[in-house]
Amino acid sequence: EVQLLESGGGLVQPGGSLRLSCAASGFIFSDYNINWVRQAPGKGLEWVSSISNSGGAKYYADSVKGRFTVSRDNSKNTVYLHLNSLRREDTALYFCARERTTEMDYWGQGTLVTVSS
Amino acid sequence: SYVLTQPPSVSVAPGKTATITCGGNNIGSKGVHWYQQRPGQAPVLVIYYDRDRPSGIPERFSGANSGDTATLNISRVEVEDEADYYCQVWDKTTDHREFGGGTKLTVL
């Protein structure tokens, strides 16, 4: 059974940092790109970042470029999202999702990031 | 960035057909994916590449894509279909993934 489990969310002050993790199981992890998608309270889905199966290609939404960094460790079946210089508008539920070709076929349940003083 | 436009809300009576649109410049040239998100839950893929259904998704869900509009149709709507629906594409010029703003489907 394919499973994705996010962790690492929490309360952080503006300007602070956080590292999110997405632990995968039930499939050959190194065969798939992984995306991060966030959802602010009461709002829609916003794509944040994508990392290729090898980790060699990384892409970011304009809203987070230069502040967030995505990485992966295929030996640990885990993708990370490093969040730096956090702003109040980064407050959201952060999902990781497996990408089959260009569609996201499996999603985790999300981890909540709250940026507040 | 590539912009996808969805109506904020659609209402339909049980047993009828719901149509949710997703507009974008020449979207017919792209593969469109649709997700269902029930309150408090993670999104679920219901249609990929315009019209294909993942296993476990009822045949009542169908899609089409042409010109500047993609559509998600849900026939014989049931109360359990009440949810938010999002369209999504891959923009090959930027390698960005783009979501529409979402449509709240209300089953009257």
Image: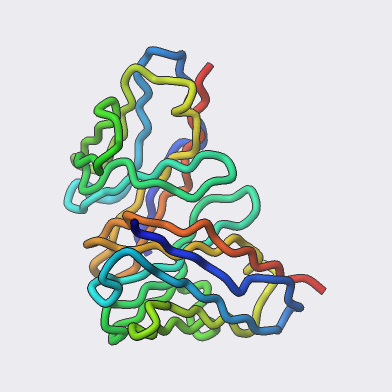
Which residue corresponds to the image point at 74% horizontal and 72% vertical from the top-left?
A11
Q: Residue furthest right?
A: A117
Residue B5 lies, with reference to residue B60, above or below; the image says below
Residue B108 in the figure: left or right of residue A41 = left
The residue depicted at 32 percent of the width and 41 percent of the height is B46
Q: Quadrant of the N terminus of chain B?
A: bottom left
Q: On screen, B102 above or below A14? A: above
Residue B69 position in % (x across, y down): 27, 40
Which residue is nearer to you in this view: A58 or A8? A8
Front-lying residue, B85 or A107: A107
Q: In this rendering, would B47 be left or right of A91?
A: left
The answer to which quarter of the image holds residue A33 is: bottom left
Position of residue A96 relative to residue A71, above or below, is above
Q: Could you tell me which residue is drawn at 63 percent across and 81 percent down?
A: A18
Rendering coords of residue B76 (x, y %): 34, 17
* Percent of width and height locating residue A88: 70, 69
Of B36 and B90, nearer the camera is B36
- How is the rendered protein coloured? rainbow
Compared across the picture, whether B102 is left or right of B64 comes to right
Residue B37 at x, y percent in the picture: 48, 43
Marker count (numbered) = 0
Q: Residue at x 62, y 62 (%)?
A: A92
